Amino acid sequence: MNQLVARTVLRRLIGGRSCNRCLSTSTAALVVPRPFEETAVLWRQGHSWGATGGAEWRRAMSTAAERTKTAPAAEEKDRKESAAAEEKKKDGGEVMVSSYWGISRPKVTRDDGTEWPWNCFMPWETYQSDLSVDLSKHHVPKTFLDKVAFRTVKILRIPTDIFFQRRYGCRAMMLETVAAVPGMVGGMLLHLRSLRKFEHSGGWIKALIEEAENERMHLMTMVELVKPKWYERLLVLAVQGVFFNAFFVLYMLSPKVAHRVVGYLEEEAIHSYTEYLKDIDSGKIENVPAPAIAIDYWRLPKDATLKDVITVIRADEAHHRDVNHFASDIHYQGKELRDAPAPVGYH
């Protein structure tokens, strides 16, 4: 009789019928969904595989059902939050943009308590330009490489004078798109070298990137003043593409010549901005109010004018001239830039 019962149970298991009818009351309790580890232990203790498999299958089905129920609820929550944000925006309120990662910008204010309007720079990155810098300094070319760098810059100035003539606003815009390249290229190459050789840069990475950022802010200011035309924007693309690649190769071959070239470029920038100021003083160029971005970046007075903006930009260019001639002199002495402390913060 026992053999007949055993054969009947085996046939039903092999035939795929429900095994729950063949289980005792204690074994049938395993049908309640359990964690995977618990069911595995029960199976190892000698319980039926069909019971364990059924428990895992039912657990998977219940998890899928829970996810199906949860997904529409999450979508509905996101939809309600978006609708609330839009409604708040219509009412003129401030909207805090939230993201999956929970990243949000802290509230930043000016010294007078008003909200900080700029995302491209923060109040602690602003400064008052040092106008006491000597504008007349000039590095006299002595070596052959210095003379090559000096003549190269003078030759590059010829097409600029022909194209822009005395339109110093457009000239300044073009100049800044070029002037912001060397600091970025030099800082990038020094950064990669530091990673390759496991050595410090002496602060020069930060100093050069700081220079590039300062030149970029010059450009953002000039764009507010000039409003470049489409063909001037096209010219910027061409000049920047050529200059970036040329300067990259030059810096790889000879950093001392590259920095010397930049030093002479900054000397030409000082000359151009000086002529710009002369035209403002003579009335050829209207002394319009300074853009808001310039007032906040250089901490200028609220009633600052174009003349004030060009004055501080010219001072920045003089500081960049000093930094690059200094960097070139370090190389001419047979040293690395990291051997001398970088003038970080020297705008």
Image: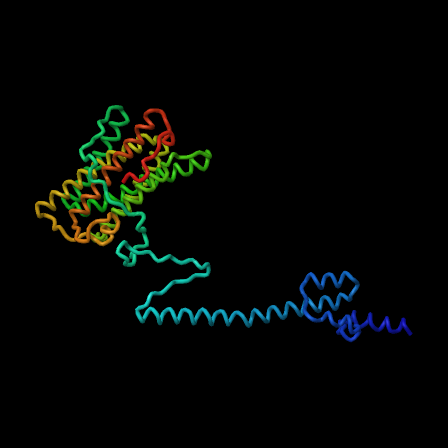
Quadrant in which the N terminus appears: bottom right
Camera-side residue of 311 and 240: 311
**Residue at the spot 46% in from the left edge and 35% down from the top edge:** 196
| Above-or-below relation of 231 to 100 | above
Residue at position x 21%, y 34% in the image:
154
Q: How many marks?
A: 0
Query: Measured along the vertical axis of the image, is residue 143 above or below residue 104?
Result: above
Q: Quadrant of residue 103?
A: bottom left
- Residue sticking out furthest to the right: 1
Outermost residue toward the left in this view: 282
Please state which of residues 202 and 148 is positioned toward the viewer in this rendering: 202
Q: For this view, does 24 lie left or right of residue 219? A: right
**In the drawing, does residue 282 fall left or right of residue 24?**
left
Going 17% across and 47% down the picture, which residue do you hit?
308
Residue 78 appears left or right of 173 = right
Q: Is residue 221 above or below residue 144?
A: below
Could you say where residue 252 lies in the image, as x and y percent from the top left?
37, 33
The correct choice, above or below, for 341 with respect to 282 in the image is above
Q: How is the image coloured?
A: rainbow
Q: Quadrant of residue 130?
A: top left
Percent from the top left, x then y, of residue 255?
34, 32
Image quadrant containing the C terminus: top left
Q: Position of residue 141 (x, y in %)?
A: 23, 26
Q: Residue at x 32, y 42 (%)?
A: 210
Q: What is the residue that sits farthest to the front in this orientation? A: 112
